[in-house]
Image (cartoon, rainbow, N blue to C red):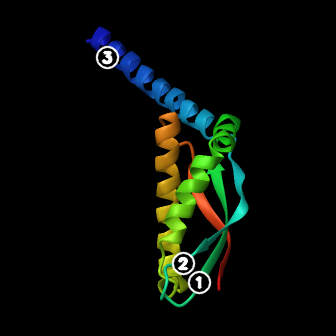
Amino acid sequence: MKRILSMALLLGLCVVLAIPAGAAEVEDVKKDPSYVKLSPAFVVNLKRGTGAKFLQVKAEVLVNSPEAAELVRLHMPAIRDAMIMQLSNQDGRAIRSVETREQLRTDAEAAVKKALQQMTGKPVIEGLFFTNYVIQ
């Protein structure tokens, strides 16, 4: 009985010790967050007959390592293409609302992740944020 109890205790200790080790690995992946500017600003023509004619957006992406930041810089042409295609396909009246702007941001983030997935085999970025948004 003592042997079974000590083996169960030892097994329990191994499980408890394994959890923090896995958690440390996750922290290592996310320990160095930074932002990369997507510059210059994106200026696109909006769909004809939809009110506003131009949209200007400044954006930055969140990455969690210097390597990911370098991949963003390396694949900037593909990122810019994905952003321009996403932004230019908008209705000038609809993108004035806060809800539609947020939807546009999440759609742009998905487009950038998809482009990076195609180029590198992984999404690379953790988020995309509009830092300036002008409609004319």
- Check whether the beta carbons of the residues at disc 1 and disc 3 lie within 8 A of each other: no
Of residues 72 and 9, which is closer to you in this image?
A: 72
Residue under the point 62% across and 42% down = 75
The answer to whether 34 appears left or right of 124 in the picture is: right
Of residues 17 and 132, which is closer to you in this image?
A: 132
- Quadrant where the C terminus is found in the figure: bottom right
Amino acid identity at mark 1 = Lys
Asked if residue 108 can be seen in this view, the reply is: yes
Is residue 11 shown above or below 85? above
Residue 89 image point, x, y percent:
47, 71
Amino acid identity at mark 3 = Leu
Residue 111 image point, x, y percent:
48, 56
Secondary structure under tag 2 reads loop
Residue under the point 34% across and 13% down = 7
Task: Return the disc, 2 or 1, that comes first in the chain's sequence.
Answer: 2
Q: Which residue is mark 3?
A: 5
Task: Return the disc, 1 or 3, that comes first in the chain's sequence.
Answer: 3
- Check whether the beta carbons of the residues at disc 2 and disc 1 lie within 8 A of each other: yes
Nearer the observer: mark 1 or 3; the answer is 1
| Alpha carbons under labels 2 and 1: distance apart | 5 Å
Residue under the point 48% across and 76% down = 90
Secondary structure under tag 3 reads helix
Is residue 80 shown above or below 67? below
- Check whether the beta carbons of the residues at disc 2 and disc 3 lie within 8 A of each other: no
| Marker disc for residue 46 | 2
Amino acid identity at mark 2 = Leu
Secondary structure under tag 1 reads loop
Task: Return the disc, 2 or 3, that comes first in the chain's sequence.
Answer: 3
Q: Which residue is mark 1?
A: 53
